[in-house]
Amino acid sequence: MVSPHCGVREPRRPRPGSHGQIEGYAVGFEGTALPKSVTEETVVSVRHYTDRLFAFRLTRPATFRFRSGEFIMLGLMVEGKPLLRAYSIASPSWDEGLDFYSIKVSDGPLTSRLQSIGVDDGVLLGKKPTGTLVLDALKPGKTLYFLSTGTGIAPFASLVREPEVYERFDRVILTHTCRHVADLAYGQDLTAAVMDDPLVGEEAREKLTYYPSITREPYAREGRITHLIDSGQMFEELGTTPFDPAHDRVMICGSMDMLKDCCERAEAAGLEEGSNARPGDYVYEKAFVS
Ligand SMILES: Cc1cc2nc3c(=O)[nH]c(=O)nc-3n(C[C@H](O)[C@H](O)[C@H](O)COP(=O)(O)OP(=O)(O)OC[C@H]3O[C@@H](n4cnc5c(N)ncnc54)[C@H](O)[C@@H]3O)c2cc1C
Ligand SMILES: NC(=O)c1ccc[n+]([C@@H]2O[C@H](COP(=O)([O-])OP(=O)(O)OC[C@H]3O[C@@H](n4cnc5c(N)ncnc54)[C@H](OP(=O)(O)O)[C@@H]3O)[C@@H](O)[C@H]2O)c1
């Protein structure tokens, strides 16, 4: 297990000065031309959880609007060109900064570089947030399940701090399944912080349940979420009943296989997929593309 360490580092890159304009581009990132589809934001903090997982916070442009649960394109200039990837915004829509939770893929074009960012560095941020993991895509209900694996917890880190979640639902369940115990640290910190949050803490303490499980080493709760659903263990431990379209709503975020298996279970229980245009009982989004 790798010990997590907080990284509040010295600035390694001067902030770009006044931004000139050339056609279709703004000038930033040490004078490099930026496409107009992005802004350059500043890293406010970085925290490394394991050798494969880290979180960081960026400044938020005053004009940047999004709905809690959405994702955005994010990246770095590499050899004079923007290298962008989809990232779920892990902070709520009301927050003054933008939080992200990231994998580190050693040979990944973006994250092999992104993992080295430090405070005051520049990161490219897209201007058009989008996504299906939004409250608008769900019909009213009583219990809201957030099912996540790995970095798929990121959109739910946004939603568990969204006051409307607690206005609309009596119970909110955040499940997070990872291979190793160390991979749970982000979710554990997150839920502890939510319970103490001045805006949503009181409601979260009453309504939010964090439900972690581990698949590749011993832990208090072991097994994939699909297994915990199929065996009935999850419902029994939570004091709820198997998914029911009459009152349950489900949001799912993980690998393609996890999405497929969880969506099958939602469908088998009679839940209908929702969308921005047509709210339903469950929605899902890829945590990454395999
Ligand atoms: C809608 C959407 C939202 C996303 N949100 C996030 C997010 O919040 N945080 C995040 O870390 N990534 C997220 N991703 C994945 C992200 O877009 C990149 O794939 C990731 O940053 C790696 O980029 P890369 O260029 O280093 O490697 P890539 O070439 O993009 O990926 C290389 C390989 O690494 C693996 N991989 C990539 N991302 C992950 C991951 N998150 N977890 C496990 N394995 C992975 C896959 O096997 C992939 O084929 C999201 C993807 C989508 C489609
Ligand atoms: N996490 C690591 O330590 C690690 C290390 C080296 C390389 N990688 C690579 O990185 C990629 C992503 O790894 P990751 O751990 O972030 O994500 P992942 O492989 O999606 O695993 C995250 C969690 O989801 C579970 N899961 C996988 N498929 C599922 C399904 N169909 N239904 C329900 N649950 C499911 C896993 O259980 P299982 O354990 O049972 O699969 C694990 O607990 C993988 O392709 C892997 O090759 C990961």
Image (cartoon, grey):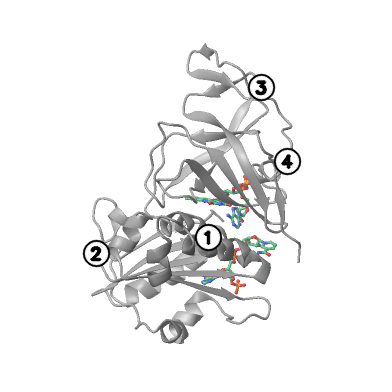
Task: Compare marks 2 and 3 and give the one earlier in the sequence.
Answer: 3
Q: CA distance from mark 1 to mark 4?
A: 23 Å
For numbered disc 3, what is the local secondary structure? loop
| Residue 286 badge | none
Name the residue type under label 1.
Ala
Residue 89 is situated, as x and y percent measured from the top left of the image, at 48, 48
For numbered disc 2, what is the local secondary structure? loop
Residue at 52%, 35% (x, y): give it: 125
Task: Compare marks 4 and 2 and give the one earlier in the sequence.
Answer: 4
Q: CA distance from mark 1 to mark 3?
A: 36 Å
Residue bearing mark 1: 193
State which mark lies toward you, 1 or 4: 1
| Residue 9 badge | 4
Residue at 55%, 48% (x, y): give it: 100
Which quadrant would the C terminus be assigned to in this image?
Answer: bottom right
Residue 218 falls in image quadrant: bottom right
Name the residue type under label 2.
Pro
Task: Compare marks 2 and 1 and give the one earlier in the sequence.
Answer: 2
State which mark lies toward you, 2 or 1: 1
Name the residue type under label 3.
Glu
Residue 252 is situated, as x and y percent measured from the top left of the image, at 43, 64
Residue at 38%, 70% (x, y): give it: 207
Residue bearing mark 2: 140
Q: Is residue 54 left or right of residue 211?
A: right
Q: Are marks 1 and 3 in contact (CB under 8 Å)?
A: no
State which mark lies toward you, 1 or 3: 1
Identify whether 287 is placed above or below 147: above
Name the residue type under label 4.
Arg
Of residues 246 and 18, the one drawn nearer to the viewer in this rendering: 18
Residue 189 falls in image quadrant: bottom right
Q: Residues within 10 Å of mark 2 (few under 14, many from 20)?
A: some
